[in-house]
């Protein structure tokens, strides 16, 4: 892995994948891994567009997070949480289910000189933590993931917690529940678009009518 600035978010440096990283071997179980949860693709090794656009938005508007307790949901590399910490968040928790992702977040936070609490495991099954803001980048990349996340985000809204979503327009985005706040051209480094900039947006999640 190489430590390098994130395209479109140069204030943040991440350990990122490159052709010689050999990350495919992480999908091959070790002898002692039998019975453990299914191994996850190394999403944490890339700066995805939804996270990049949220990070850019937060760094450009630090008042959104300043003094607040923030949850980076599905944190991956920790890009969004690191940006929130740099922008003056009171405390940042990064929720990530991948054990390698949790390690990556810790290393990336250290490389950027910020403190982030890491919550390993699926926080969406329980009540909202003690926070004021959820930052959710690229959490609607698959139907089953979106269906699992939405009830948790609705519980957050019901508890008075604001929810911001970053996404480049993936298929399972709940568009009827979103209010557009801003749009940037950012590369979807981990996606099929390669490094070419593409429109990505930040939305406020709103409660269902009635």
Image (cartoon, helix red, strand yellow):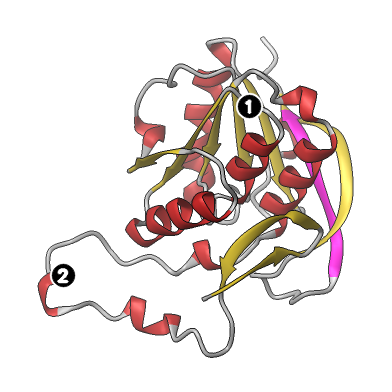
In the image, residue 32 above or below residue 146: below
Between 121 and 143, the residue placed more toward the observer is: 121
As measured in the structure, the alpha-carbon distance from the residue carrying label 2 to the one carrying label 1 is 37 Å
**Looking at the image, which residue is at 73% across and 65% down?**
188
The residue depicted at 88 percent of the width and 51 percent of the height is 184
Residue 89: numbered disc? 1
Q: Image height check: is 10 above or below 121?
A: below
Reply above or below: 176 against 172.
above
The foreground one among 15 and 151 is 15
- The residue located at (63%, 27%) in the rendering is 89
Q: Quadrant of residue 48?
A: bottom right
In the displayed structure image, the side of residue 123 where residue 47 appears, left or right: right
Query: Seen in the image, is 31 located left or right of residue 152?
Result: left
In percent of width and height, residue 208 lies at 66, 19
**Residue 139 in magenta?**
no
Instruction: Please tell me which residue is depicted at 60% across the width and 44% down the height of the picture.
Output: 82
Location of residue 163 in the rendering, given as x and y in whole percent from the top left corner = 64, 27
Displayed quadrant of residue 36: bottom left
State which quarter of the image contains the C terminus.
top right
Main SS of the magenta part reads strand
- Mark 2 or 1, closer to the camera: 1
- Secondary structure under tag 2 reads helix
Along the polypeptide, which appears first: circle 2 or circle 1? 2
Residue 188 badge? none
| Residue position for label 2 | 33
Q: Residue furthest front?
A: 113
For the record, the magenta segment spans 197-204
């Amino acid at each position: 892995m190489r430590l390098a600035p994130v395209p479109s978010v140069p204030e943040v440096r991440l350990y990122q994948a490159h052709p010689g990283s050999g990350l495919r071997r992480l999908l091959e179980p070790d002898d002692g891994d039998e019975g453990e949860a299914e191994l996850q693709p190394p999403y944490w090794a890339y700066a995805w567009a939804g996270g990049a656009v949220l990070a850019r938005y937060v760094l450009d508007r630090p008042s959104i997070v300043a003094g607040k307790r923030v949850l980076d949901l599905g944190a991956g590399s920790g890009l969004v949480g690191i940006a929130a910490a740099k922008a003056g968040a009171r405390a940042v928790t990064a929720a990530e289910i991948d054990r390698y992702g949790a390690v990556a977040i810790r290393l990336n936070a250290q490389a950027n000189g910020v403190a982030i609490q890491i919550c390993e495991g699926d926080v969406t099954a329980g009540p909202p933590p003690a926070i004021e803001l959820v930052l959710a980048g690229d959490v609607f990349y698959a139907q089953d993931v979106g269906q699992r996340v939405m009830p948790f985000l609705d519980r957050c809204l019901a508890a008075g917690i604001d929810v911001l979503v970053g996404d480049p327009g993936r298929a399972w985005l709940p568009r009827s529940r979103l209010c557009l706040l801003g749009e940037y051209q950012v590369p979807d480094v981990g996606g099929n678009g390669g490094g070419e900039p593409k429109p990505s947006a930040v939305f406020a999640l709103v409660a269902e009518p009635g």
